[in-house]
Structures are given as C-alpha cells and as structure tokens.
Amino acid sequence: MLPIGASTYVITRRGPVTYTNGLPVRTAPTTFSVVASVQPLNGQDLIRAPEGLRRSDARKAYLYITDEVRTVLAAGVEADLMTVDGVVYEIYHIDPHNVFSPLPHQRAYLQAAQGTDGAEVGS
Amino acid sequence: MSYIPTALELAVYQWLEPYITGTLIYENQDAPRPATTFSTLLVIDDARVGRPATQVTDTPDGDDFVGYGSTLRNATVRVTSYGRTAYAVLQGLQEQWSLPDSSYQAGLLGLSIYNITQARRIPQILSQVTEDRWIIELQVYAVREVAAATQALNSIDATVSLTDPS
C-alpha cells in the first residue's frame, strides 16, 4: 500500500569519510529511489526541530520501513540527502514506527541542505 | 570546499602527529568528525617577530633579480582533543614536547616549541551527552622564507650633456 500522495524521490547517500594527513578523503556518493509522501512540518514538528533550524525550509517524508534512509549515526558518516522538487534536503531525524503501528512506516525529517558557503548542497 | 593548510600548519601537523594518540585533523573543516578520540589543530595567530631579513640576488642572465625574505614568526597553535581519553592524549603531548628528540624533530621542520599551556577542560553537550574536550595551546617560533622574482632594470637610457666650464 502506497502512502497517501506518494511519489518517487531520489536519495543521495554520501560515501564514508576517512582522514589522511589531517584532511578528509571522500568517496563517491550513491543514489537510489524511494517512494514517499512529503508533507510540510506542523507546529509541534517545528518546536522539536534542532536549535537554529526552525525557520528554514523543512519537510517530513513518510516512507516504507524497508527503505533504509539514514541520518548521522556514527563518526565519518553524513546524513542522506533527499531531492524534493529540485531542492536538496538533508535528513536530520528519523522516527521509525515499526512495532505497534498497523502500517509499519518511518518518518524522516528533512532540512534544506546548505554548504558552508551558504549555497544549497549540490547547486 | 576543501581546507588548504598553510606551510606553517603543515609543519606543525608533521611535528604533532607522532605525539597525538588517535586521529589528528585540522580544525574547521566541512566534513564529518572522525571517530573519537581525535584531536584538532588550529593556528590561531601568526605574528612576525622583528624585521624581515631580505637578500637580493642577480640571476645569471642579468634580466631579473630574485628577492628572498626571511621572517621569524611567533605562532600560537591550539590543540583540542575530543572524547573520553582526551586528557590523556594531551598529557602525552605535554610529556613529550620538551624532550630532546621532539625538539630535534621540531628543528628539522623549522620550528621551535617554547611553551605549552596547562590543559583546560571545555566539555560540551553533544546529542544530549556531555562530550569531554580538553584544550592546550602551544607557542611556536617558526621561520618563514619566501622567494619572489623581482623585475629589475634591463637597460638605462641616458642623455649626455656636457658643458665646458671654461
């Protein structure tokens, strides 16, 4: 069963980063597609958003529990990026609903991704 | 954008790296953190001491001079260590910095480490957990040399004007 209003989106998984002589060495990213229903954040979602991320462009996506998207979990790992209507978002939080839910799914919270120069990631 | 360390940072990194347990990286990079325990280094100031020594040499073809400048620098290097063993990492550095071998290694890199501060604790909350962080600063003398090609005169045009004084 597809989530309501679902569509197909591209997830970009950045490769693990190692350090050589004090500088990061990145590996090439990979991409895959997921089916998701992307919706705006409500007020409670915005309150729970990390400090400093409450006024930027943010969304949440309902995904199948089997789609293994990720946020930052370990050293040397960067969160997945999700492209929605041409805008690149970074996944900053994931809520899995896989135990008590009649329809196992996960909610991924997305934040418009920006590089250190202020430009959107990937632009 | 990739971080580009300066010549001074490269020299300090080479000196520090053998005395730091765990990964040593440059601070302020746009990349995920390595696994703890890791340490970062940052040259927080780099001041000239005294006047620069300069030397100008004529090249064999006579067209260009090459100017050499040599300045003594007094730099402050901040080393921050992250993780549960951060204090032990910096203690290890404090035990090593003035030993003859480390002084010799610094000399090979054009450095002289003449002071090291006490380690100070600056814990931070990261993902609802307090992460231990310790910081020290090194005072470093370094020599910076630059050589820049300088355009010299190729010829002199002169007009002779003689006046008979009698």
Image (tube, rainbow, N blue to C red):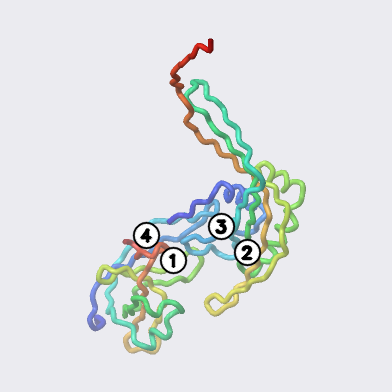
Residue topped by disc 2 = B81
Three-letter residue code for mark 1 = Glu
Q: Are marks 4 and 3 in contact (CB under 8 Å)?
A: no
Q: In front of the other: label 4 or label 3?
A: 3
Q: Residue at x 27, y 79 (%)?
A: A37
Q: Are marks 4 and 3 on the same chain?
A: no
Residue topped by disc 3 = B25
Quarter of the image for residue A90 reads: bottom left
Quarter of the image for residue A7 reads: bottom left
Per the model, the C-alpha gap separating discs 3 and 2 is: 10 Å
Per the model, the C-alpha gap separating discs 3 and 1 is: 17 Å
Q: Nearer the viewer, residue B64 or A121?
A: B64
Per the model, the C-alpha gap separating discs 4 and 3 is: 23 Å
Three-letter residue code for mark 3 = Ile
Element under disc 1: loop
Give coordinates of residue A14: x percent, y percent: 39, 62
Q: Residue at x 40, y 72 (%)?
A: A70
Residue topped by disc 4 = A29
Element under disc 3: strand
Parent chain of label 4: A
Query: Which callout, 3 or 2, points at the residue further toward the start of the chain?
Result: 3
Label 4 packing within 10 angstroms: few (<14), some (14-19), many (20+): few
Q: Residue at x 47, y 61 (%)?
A: B31
Q: In front of the other: label 4 or label 2?
A: 2
Q: Is residue B97 above or below residue A35?
A: above
Q: Nearer the viewer, residue B113 or A83?
A: B113
Residue topped by disc 1 = A78
Element under disc 2: strand
Q: Nearer the viewer, residue A98 or B1?
A: B1
Total labels: the figure holds: 4
